[in-house]
Image (cartoon, rainbow, N blue to C red):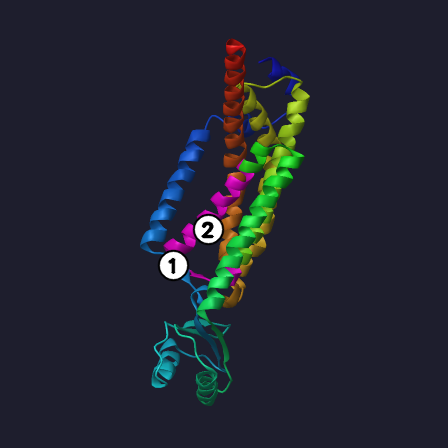
């Protein structure tokens, strides 16, 4: 290809030269579609394990100066007339238990729990309660934040690059967010307000990675000095751009993954939801930036150019 000779100005190792991202695009798309279908089925069958932040209820953090057992904590609440979900132990010596009660407690009930738990375990527990209305508002605001972020991303990428790149970037972000939701649904991990924070964090990280690749695409299109029109020509540009940014993308995600993994191993139970969502989102984010966003943009771009060409031909014929 003539363009290949003009733009082959860098030397890549054998793996980069051999692997064709555009050639395998249908495999990547099929994997993502399969994951989306699994996610939809999972949400229908298992649903999301919503924490009290979204579903309302009361959370009690029981602390003790020594190790405590799930049975002992559960029994303490049943004696008071409550039926809590299975307590979750945390802390260095299993001296903290998180208990969830699926009802909104009043001030008198909260005072009773604090008094009796302190008498039994020696430390006054932390009690937080969320009403159904607050839970709905938190869920609505979380979705609104994600929607607004997507709109502004499209506008930003549209101004800096073009609309189709903004659209594919947001589709890749939705793909990442939905995959995190799928994992949480399949594993029945509790979803709380930190989950929304993790989603928005991944959105910011993933869009940065995607924009870097799109920026390289734009530069390589300029260097080609040719009006691109076929999937082969766009495919060459996409492959070249991904290869030039691949090492950076992988190094960046590995650098971020290291502290996230350490947080998963040594971090507090209270931020476990956040770290799991980050871990899944980082892996999915680098995958979508490399294998979904740019190849999908190339496919949509060629289809757009073909439709525009057909429209012009039809107008010329009718004229």
Name the mark on residue 188. 1
Does 192 lie within the magenta span? Answer: yes
Q: Disc 1, disc 2: CB below 8 Å?
A: no
Q: Between residues 227 and 97, which one lies in front from this camera angle?
A: 227
Quarter in which the C terminus is drawn: top right
Q: Relative to the observer, which residue lies in front, 40 or 147? A: 147
Task: Identify the element where label 1 is drawn.
Answer: loop
| Residue at (38% x, 59% y) in the render | 188
Assign a secondary structure to mark 2: helix
Q: Is residue 100 above or below residue 22?
A: below
> Where 17 falls versus 107 (above or below)?
above
Question: Would you name the residue on which mark 2 appears?
Answer: 180
Residue 129, position as x, y percentages in the image: 48, 74
Position of the N terminus, as image quadrant, is top right
Q: Quadrant of residue 35?
A: top left
Q: Left or right of 149: which side holds 58?
A: left
Nearer the observer, 15 or 37: 37
Q: Earlier in the sequence, mark 1 or mark 2?
A: 2
Can the viewer see residue 28? yes
Q: Which residues are magenta?
A: 168-195
The residue sitting at 51% across, 46% down in the picture is: 283
Horizontal and vertical percent position of residue 92: 51, 72
């Amino acid at each position: 290809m003539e363009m290949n000779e003009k733009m082959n100005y860098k030397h890549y190792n054998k793996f980069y030269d051999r692997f064709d991202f555009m050639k395998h695009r249908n495999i990547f798309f099929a994997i993502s579609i399969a994951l989306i279908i699994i996610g939809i089925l999972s949400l229908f069958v298992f649903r999301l394990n919503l924490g009290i932040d979204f579903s309302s209820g009361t959370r009690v953090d029981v602390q003790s100066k020594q190790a405590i057992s799930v049975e002992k904590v559960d029994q303490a609440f049943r004696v008071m007339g409550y039926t809590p979900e299975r307590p979750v132990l945390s802390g260095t010596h299993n001296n903290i238990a998180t208990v969830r009660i699926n009802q909104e407690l009043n001030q008198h009930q909260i005072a009773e729990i604090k008094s009796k738990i302190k008498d039994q375990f020696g430390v006054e527990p932390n009690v937080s309660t969320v009403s159904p209305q607050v839970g709905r508002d938190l869920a609505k605001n979380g979705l609104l934040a994600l929607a607004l972020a997507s709109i502004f991303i499209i506008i930003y990428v549209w101004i800096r690059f073009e609309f189709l790149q903004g659209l594919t970037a947001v589709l890749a972000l939705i793909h990442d967010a939905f995959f995190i939701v799928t994992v949480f649904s399949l594993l029945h991990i509790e979803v709380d307000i930190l989950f929304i924070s993790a989603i928005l964090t991944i959105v910011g990280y993933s869009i940065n990675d995607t924009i870097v690749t799109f920026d390289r695409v734009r530069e390589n299109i300029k260097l080609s000095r040719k009006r691109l029109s076929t999937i082969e020509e766009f495919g060459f540009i996409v492959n070249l751009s991904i290869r030039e940014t691949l090492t950076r993308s992988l190094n960046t995600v590995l650098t971020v993954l290291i502290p996230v993994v350490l947080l998963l191993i040594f971090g507090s139970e209270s931020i476990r939801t956040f770290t799991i969502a980050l871990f899944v989102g980082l892996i999915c984010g680098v995958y979508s930036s490399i294998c979904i966003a740019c190849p999908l943009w190339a496919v949509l771009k060629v289809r757009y150019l073909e439709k525009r060409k057909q429209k012009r031909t039809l107008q010329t014929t009718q004229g």
